[in-house]
Amino acid sequence: MHTKTAHTAMVALLMALLLCQARAQAGVYIRGEPTDHVTLGAAVDHAVHGDVIELGPGTYAAEDLPIVVGVDVTLIGTHGSAMTTLHNPEDHYAGDLIQVNGATVSVQGITLSSDGPARGIDMDGGGLAALDLVAVGLGGDFPGGAIRTRRGPLTVAGCAFVGNAGRSGGAIDSGGPLSVDDTVFSNNRGSAEGGAVRAHRDVVLSSVRFTNNTAGLDGGAAYIDGVATITAVVLDGNVERAGAMHGGGLVVQP
């Protein structure tokens, strides 16, 4: 009987390990639940406060856009942004991939991209943390090509924003406090102020590189309305178009 019990326990352990391995390979899961969801939107709709939604490696077509998040959750690519992509394949969709409405949300280890003029994330109230996020080829004729925050704090760390475009802030238009650390902004375009970043409140920049970003008006790299705390920031090849009043690098108006 003891041997049979040990064998049963071993089988159960192996099944659990296989389940964990399968979940690490593919699918969208809410941590602690045994079954996957067909889309990220379905998982978000099912989630409750404090859930962690895991995306295995792969490219996920964004469906039923926008994905509206109204509870405090974490969205995490289990193998990091190099292995996990949320992509909008619709070239006619001009909206947001993810909308955060009054919730505290963390997005980690995911690449956001689009074939059409779509923004990555729009937040209205709550708070947003972007960690190991890659935003590439996002944006359109609206503020913040990759991320726009209307209210609430935005924290960005270990991210890359490449080739995004927006009316103001080619990559980020921040209406609340903004903190950026260990992040690269490259080849983003703002048709007005802020080639990469347009901030309307206080900003902390630490170990940030701005390369080849372009603004139609002021601040080829960033335009900041507020107090800026700046440490180890590199500016390289950022420009403003002819006729602007301020420089092609950082413009700070406290």
Image (cartoon, rainbow, N blue to C red):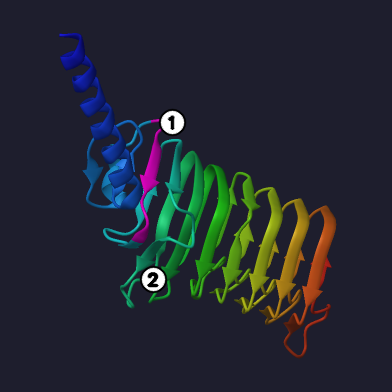
Q: Residue 126 location, x and y as percent?
A: 54, 40
Residue beneath the point at 30% across and 48% down: 28
Report the residue marked by disc 1.
50
User: Which amino acid does the dot numbered 2 rest on?
Assistant: Ala
One can see residue 115 in this view? yes
Residue beneath the point at 79% across and 54% down: 226
SS of the residue under disc 1 = loop
Above or below for 29 versus 218: above
The answer to whether residue 55 is magenta is yes
Q: Which residues are magenta?
A: 49-58
SS of the residue under disc 2 = loop
User: Which amino acid does the dot numbered 1 rest on?
Assistant: Gly
Label ID, residue 94 = 2
- Taking the image as shown, residue 83 lies to the left or right of residue 89, namely right
Which image quadrant: the C terminus?
Answer: bottom right
Which image quadrant: the N terminus?
Answer: top left
Q: Toward the viewer: 29 or 231?
A: 29
Residue beneath the point at 27% across and 60% down: 63
Q: Residue 5 location, x and y as percent?
A: 19, 14
Q: Toward the viewer: 32 or 231?
A: 32
The answer to whether residue 146 is magenta is no
